Image (cartoon, rainbow, N blue to C red):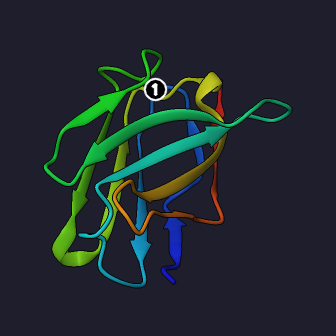
């Protein structure tokens, strides 16, 4: 069992930046894909960005060029650098760790709130 703990959320003005962290209680090398998701109020959870164990990143169109995902396997931590934040980026942000090979594994953090004031 691996626990994921997000941190770094908070209140920021539009145009500002935040850096989210997702710390795992164990090694993240076993997870071939890790990602950030977000859930705005009253809406469904949506994918923000993913990163493979090899460092290949992919982003939702809405955050391309503004957000950067990274992972440090040695520190068992994943990051999301968010810049040029917009009010529509406000949401609870969740980190996910996924292993698609057997045995398949899938873990979620408890979420961290990001609020963007206009």
- Pinpoint residue 4: horizontal percent, then vertical percent: 50, 72
For the residue pair 8 and 72, the one nearer the viewer reads as: 72
Q: Residue at x 49, y 60 (%)?
A: 8
For the residue pair 73 and 118, the one nearer the viewer reads as: 73
- Pinpoint residue 50: horizontal percent, then vertical percent: 36, 41
Relative placement, left or right, of 11 versus 22 is right
- Pinpoint residue 111: horizontal percent, then vertical percent: 63, 59
Relative placement, left or right, of 102 versus 13 is left
Question: Above or below — where is 4 with respect to 34?
Answer: below
Q: Residue at x 30, y 30 (%)?
A: 58
Q: Quadrant of residue 49?
A: top left
Question: Above or below — where is 115 with respect to 65?
Answer: below
Q: Specify few, some or many for label 1: CA neighbours under 10 Å numbering under 14, 14-19, or 20 or more.
A: some
Q: Residue at x 28, y 69 (%)?
A: 30
Q: Residue at x 29, y 79 (%)?
A: 27
Residue beneath disc 1: 15
Indicate the quadrant containing the C terminus: top left, top right, bottom left or bottom right. Answer: top right
> Element type at marker 1?
loop
């Amino acid at each position: 069992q691996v626990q994921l703990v997000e941190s770094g959320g908070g209140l920021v003005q539009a145009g500002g930046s935040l850096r989210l962290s997702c710390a795992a209680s164990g090694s993240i090398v076993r997870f071939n894909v890790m990602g950030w998701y977000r859930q705005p109020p009253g809406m469904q959870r949506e994918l923000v960005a993913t990163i493979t164990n090899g460092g290949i990143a992919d982003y939702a169109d809405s955050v391309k060029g503004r957000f950067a995902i990274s992972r440090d396997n040695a520190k068992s931590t994943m990051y999301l650098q968010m810049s040029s934040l917009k009010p529509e980026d406000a949401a609870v942000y969740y980190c996910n760790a996924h292993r698609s090979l057997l045995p398949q594994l899938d873990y979620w953090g408890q979420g961290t709130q990001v609020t963007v004031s206009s």
